Amino acid sequence: MKNKLIITLLLGLIIACKPSTTTKVSAEKEVINTVKLNDAQLKNAQLSIGKLEQKTMSYKLKVNGKISIPVQNAISISAPLGGYLKWTNLTEGKQVKKGEIIASLEDQQYIQIQQDYLSAKAQFSGIEKEYLRQKSLNTNKATSDKIFENAEATYLSQKILIKSLSEKLKLIQINPDQLNETNLSRNIKIYSPINGFVRSVKTTIGRYVSPTEVLFELTNPSDLYLSLTVFEKDINKLKIGQDIIAYSNQSSQEKFKGKIQTIGKDISADRSLTVYCTFNTKDQTLIPGMYMNAEIDVASSLEYAIPNEAIVKNESKEYVFIQQNPTTFKMIEIISGTSDNGLTQISIPNSANTADDIFVTKGSYTLLMQLKNMGEE
């Protein structure tokens, strides 16, 4: 029993002498957020203080997108009836004018269409005369209705044939009114339908191309627009007519002004939609497909704001100092918002008396260094 009593006493003594883990942990977690300055420190700090002011803050929503062109300004050129590409001088980036010959094709079917048209036209005169004669005879009941109906059907069929062949000729850029037996050609010409430049060349000289193949892609850059990707959470900040400023990554100093033209209605899987903007002035340096950054002027609002220099950063968080008495200042965490004209909108979590507090508006960095020195002591 004596030995058990001695062991019990020794264990109690060991436990009593062991440092308190709870106390140590609590001390490590204690954060110093209040600094008190003496008269000399206060004088050297050269602090400025004041209350938060409500300011009208405007800010810019930063987004990105790319230069696009309207559907009507992107033209794919093909050969309506197919043929062999005989000639072209187009290269990517080359400028073209509306009505300019950009290629010629060759195929025997072109000769056949011209021949069929001229033959149908040559036969039409006789068919028309017979139709008119039978019509006159039928009116006087000198011939049967059946003979007249056959003559009328032949006449109408020939008119339809001539019209259809005429449209085929127009399709391959041959004027049927100027076609005769002396100017038949096995070649056809392709003309540029727009002013613009060549975006791509899809074929080579001597190759046969079918009617479904694209020979060239042309672009008219006169009506370029900027398509921007905006996330769903920011859509309510936008409206048609808002100003934008766009710039590229390669030349951020060169700004292009524009306005929001339309706002898309289809939200994609990543919760974004497209906003379409037009440029105020045309610029030849803008090219379809070019990626751009943009800033959108968002409507102004009345916010509590503080000078930018009043905000300090420490371990990825932002803080300001509030004066508790003439020589004591407390550091509190804030959430910063819009910055404009040297001021930053701030909000203080779980604070109901922001408007009544006295803030350090200049010299916050000095106070932060003083706090850090206190923490190292």
Image (cartoon, rainbow, N blue to C red):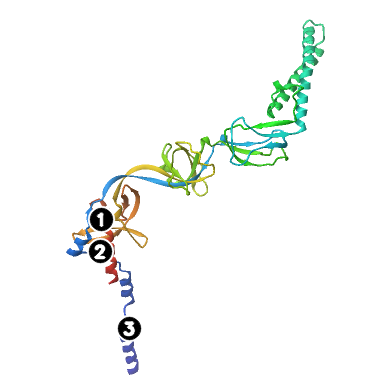
**Distance of mark 1 from mark 3, alpha carbons?**
52 Å
- Across and down, in percent, residue 277 comes to 47, 39
User: Which residue lies at the image location 26% right of the left edge and 62% below the top edge?
Assistant: 367
Work out whether residue 97 or residue 136 is closer to the camera in this orientation and state it. Answer: 97
Q: Quadrant of residue 209?
A: top right
Total numbered labels = 3
Label at residue 34:
2
**Distance of mark 1 from mark 2, alpha carbons?**
17 Å
Crowd class of label 3 (few under 14; some 14 to 19; many from 20; radius 10 Å):
few
Work out whether residue 30 or residue 188 is closer to the camera in this orientation and state it. Answer: 188
**Secondary structure of residue under mark 1:** strand
Label at residue 362:
1
- Across and down, in percent, residue 245 comes to 42, 42
- Across and down, in percent, residue 55 comes to 29, 45
Q: Amino acid at mark 2?
A: Thr
**Secondary structure of residue under mark 3:** helix
